[in-house]
Amino acid sequence: MDLPIEIFVKERELLSHSLRRQMIRSPIIHKWNCSTFTDENMGGEAMIETELLKELNPNASPIGACPLSHELLMLLSLKQKLLGQKRFRFNVHLIDASKWPSQFFQYSFRHIPAIYDPNRLFASDNFTDILSYLDEQYPTMEMLPKFSKEEHCQQVVKLCCKLFRRFYGPVVDQRLHSWFTQLDTILLQYDGTFCSNDINQLTNIDTEILPMLHQMRIIIRYLYGDDITNRYNGIANYMIRAYNRIEFAQWCPSDQEIIFMCQIKPNIVVQRREMIRLIKAEPTFSLSVSTLS
């Protein structure tokens, strides 16, 4: 049996004080896959959260609101499901971005997410290289988009990347609505199914765009009181299917974490009082969509 791949991701910034006091740290395997959470800021102890947090969201993860980390962990979970836990295992290390652990100096990492595969002595913090390596060394043909959807899949990726980059630009561009409409039109053609011909099979295209769409949905709702899933039926159907997938939900950051991270947007300023409220609030997870008309 191969050794587990070591994955380094950013830990979440916000955690309610009541939950922080009740965190336990013991070598417990993660509920949904053969991996452990290791908090490198707590002496490298394996960590799992108490039942109190699981009651709030059984699938809650302690990772930060980094769409690349979410994408990577979704991809790893899907590969593990398809390849089997005996062939593919991974451990998740939670990293405080202000305090690099010793492994980062050992592997010359400068960014997160990062990966180290002891089976092939591969180490990288370049996200493109990480994805290429996983596809080459641990191929899963089931996750490739179907040829009949390939062109539309590339359109979806380009639109989502445009939306995400513009969304975090200095101003909210009027073209956002146009791009959301184009994306919605493509998704409506397939009734909100994933980027494969199998309604139940996520692809590597889905793992790329779903974290971006979810984060944009949460931030738009917080800033403007508007929910894109109420405005665009194709996107709504697509997100409904995603929220029902454990591979997406188990790694999804809390709404508060996503809102906190949106401060990187130049024209967004979260007031100190609001920041305190976010820190003290119990985590919420918007993993549902209102009934469509």
Image: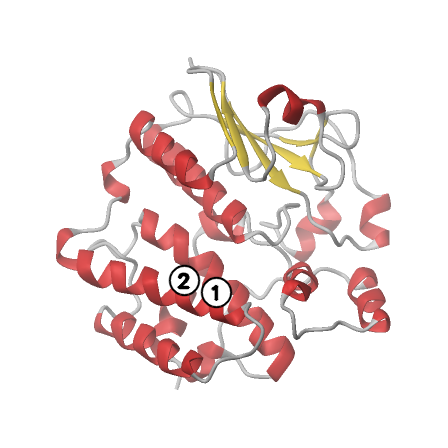
Q: Is residue 12 left or right of residue 133?
A: right
Give residue 110's position: percent from left, percent from top: 61, 35
Compared with 249, 137 (above or below) is above
Give residue 1's position: percent from left, percent from top: 42, 13
Q: What amino acid type is highlighted by mark number 2?
A: Cys
Q: Specify the quadrant of the image occupied by residue 26.
A: top right
Compared with 74, 275 (above or below) is below
Residue 291 visible? The answer is: no
For label 2, the SS is helix
Residue at the limit of the structure toward the front, as seen here:
170
Residue under the image location 37 percent in, 30 percent down: 133
For label 1, the SS is helix
Give residue 161's position: percent from left, percent from top: 41, 62
Quarter of the picture containing the C terminus is: bottom left
Q: Is residue 194 left or right of residue 149?
A: right
Residue ID for mark 1: 165
Q: Nearer the viewer, residue 111 or 45?
A: 111
Q: Is residue 58 left or right of residue 269?
A: left
Q: Specify the quadrant of the image occupied by residue 266.
A: bottom right
Crowdedness of circle 2 by 10 Å Cα count: few (<14), some, many (20+)? Answer: some
Q: Is residue 249 left or right of residue 158?
A: right
Disc number for residue 161: 2
Residue under the image location 62 percent in, 47 percent down: 61
Q: Specify the quadrant of the image occupied by residue 76.
A: top left
Residue at the limit of the structure toward the left, as seen here:
148
Question: What colour scheme does the image use?
Answer: secondary structure
Residue under the image location 53 percent in, 79 percent down: 172
